[in-house]
Image: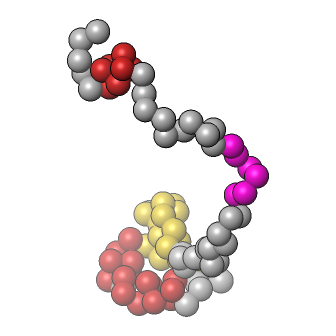
């Protein structure tokens, strides 16, 4: 269900509107009758994490953490080359 309230009513009854939104209701806030914002329930779509869920989707080379060449390392450290 969607409820529309004007800004003044939203300021006056903000706590109650937040409770309604937390309970699943969507509130549209209007200025001069024109909708300008929406207060809606926060949905946590995250389920439990599954280790290894990205296995096989990307490749990390064996030398990923090998030391950088001196000239590239100097550039990162701001040393003149």
Identify the residue at image location x=43%, y=84%: 18
Q: Does residue 29 appear left or right of residue 50 in this picture?
A: left
In percent of width and height, residue 37 lies at 48, 64
**Which residue is at 49% across, 73% downward?**
39
Work out whether residue 19 or residue 4 is closer to the camera in this orientation and state it. 19
Answer with the quarter of the image where residue 69 lies: top left
For the C terminus, give its image quadrant: top left
Tell me the chief SS of the magenta region: loop
The vertical placement of 11 against 51, above or below, is: below
Q: Residue 33: x, y in percent?
A: 50, 65
Answer above or below: position of 15 versus 67: below
Q: Position of residue 78 (x, y in %)?
A: 24, 21
Residue 1 relative to residue 81: left or right: right
Q: Quick check: is 58 in the magenta stretch?
A: yes
Task: Verify whether residue 23 appears in magenta.
Answer: no
Quarter that holds the N terminus: bottom right
Relative to 73, residue 3 above or below: below
Range of residues picked out in magenta:
54-59
């Amino acid at each position: 269900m969607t409820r529309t309230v004007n800004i003044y009513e939203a300021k006056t009854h903000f706590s109650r509107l937040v409770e309604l939104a937390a309970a699943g209701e969507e509130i549209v806030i209007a200025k001069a009758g024109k909708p300008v914002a929406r207060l809606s329930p926060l949905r946590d779509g995250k389920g439990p994490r599954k280790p290894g869920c990205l296995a096989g989707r990307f490749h990390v080379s064996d030398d990923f953490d090998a030391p950088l060449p001196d000239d590239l390392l100097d550039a990162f450290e701001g040393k003149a080359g």
